[in-house]
């Protein structure tokens, strides 16, 4: 898959391009993208996705945070067999463009033969641009998709975030249309786990709003899958109230610091608790490990 910065392209053939916010590539997003891929194949054109690289919400005064990084979203899009991604690192001036200004910006850089989007897609300043405007500009080979529904409610990024904030991994999976998986680089931790006989790998939580607690997880690395248990949040037994993601990988020995691994969440297991001492914590972790082994 080719990835282009829109600021650096001119007269690039985008073929059939999918429009949307695409901040977590949930079921609705997937349908829009898959339709673009299908139409592109039918007409012998490349398939493309328009993507914001950054979190645009703070630029318009809204306090929202992404679930996935830009790199993770690229990975999910590539899995859908898209040919090109055209991204922009938006600023306030770009978000202030009128709908026609937005269309002119695209026309000055891309050759668009058709598009796909959801019926609720909007663009330009204050979301004034609508799918009908895209039809007038690029309507030769296009599809405007109905809202994607689940349990009579629109599938949305906010529903995914709500499920994750409640620890409802099964619901998040249903809305995403795939496992909830993070692709992150292992960071240096406090090494408390290693001292207790449970060496862990650590990840930053960034702005992820995941329910704090202990989860059953699995780790994919070097082409293999390992069972794991993951603590999301603080470490109160050690007086550490900073939040991170800390994972103990069962039946693995090796140094993963600085490497990228895939961490898949399977089930919320229990709340974080403060233990009287290290021995009590070790006993609980041993129970957690046994429960994880029995899970699958």
Image (cartoon, grey):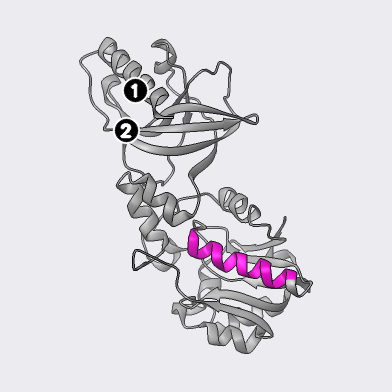
Which corner quadrant of the image does residue 86 belong to?
bottom right
Residue 34 counted in the magenta span = yes
Q: Residue at x 71, y 60 (%)?
A: 4
Residue at the left extreme of this rendering = 276
Mark linked to residue 228: none
Residue 175 counted in the magenta span = no
Magenta-tinted stretch: 26-41
Q: Nearer the viewer, residue 177 or 272?
A: 177
Which image quarter holds the N terminus?
Answer: bottom right
- Residue corresponding to mark 1: 288
Q: Which of 2 and 190 is in front in this view?
A: 2
Q: Residue 45 placed where, x, y %?
A: 77, 71
* Dots 2, 1 in contact, CB < 8 A: yes
Q: What element carries label 1?
A: helix
Q: Which of 276 and 8 is in front in this view?
A: 276
Q: What element carries label 2?
A: strand
Can you say whether 271 is above or below 16 in the image? above
Can you say whether 16 is above or below 229 in the image? below
- Residue corresponding to mark 2: 269
What secondary structure is the stretch in magenta mostly built from? helix
Q: Residue 34 placed where, x, y %?
A: 61, 65
Q: Residue 274 placed where, x, y %?
A: 22, 23
């Amino acid at each position: 898959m080719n990835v282009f910065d829109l600021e650096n392209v001119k007269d690039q053939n985008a073929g059939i391009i999918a429009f949307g916010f695409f901040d977590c590539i949930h079921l609705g997003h997937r349908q829009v993208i898959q339709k673009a891929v299908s139409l592109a194949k039918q007409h012998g054109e490349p398939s493309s996705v328009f993507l914001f690289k950054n979190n645009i919400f703070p630029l318009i005064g809204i306090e929202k945070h992404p679930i996935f990084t830009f790199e993770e979203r690229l990975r999910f899009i590539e899995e859908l067999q898209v040919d090109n991604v055209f991204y922009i690192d938006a600023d306030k001036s770009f978000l202030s463009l009128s709908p026609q200004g937005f269309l002119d910006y695209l026309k000055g850089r891309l050759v668009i033969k058709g598009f796909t989007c959801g019926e609720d897609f909007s663009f330009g300043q204050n979301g004034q641009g609508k799918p009908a405007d895209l039809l007038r500009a690029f309507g030769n080979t296009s599809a405007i998709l109905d809202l994607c529904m689940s349990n009579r409610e629109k599938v949305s990024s906010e529903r995914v975030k709500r499920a994750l904030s409640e620890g409802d991994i099964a619901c998040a999976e249903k809305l995403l249309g795939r496992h909830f998986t993070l692709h992150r680089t292992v960071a240096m931790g406090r090494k408390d786990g290693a001292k207790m006989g449970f060496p862990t790998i650590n990840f930053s939580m960034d702005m992820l709003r995941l329910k704090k607690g202990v989860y059953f997880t699995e780790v994919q690395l070097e082409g293999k899958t390992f069972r794991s248990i993951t603590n999301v949040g603080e470490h109160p037994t050690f007086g550490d109230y900073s939040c991170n993601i800390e994972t103990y990988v069962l039946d693995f020995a090796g140094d993963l610091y600085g490497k990228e691994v895939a961490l898949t969440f399977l089930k919320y297991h229990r709340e974080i608790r403060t233990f009287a001492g290290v021995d009590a914590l070790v006993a609980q972790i041993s129970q957690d490990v046994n429960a994880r082994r029995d899970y699958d």
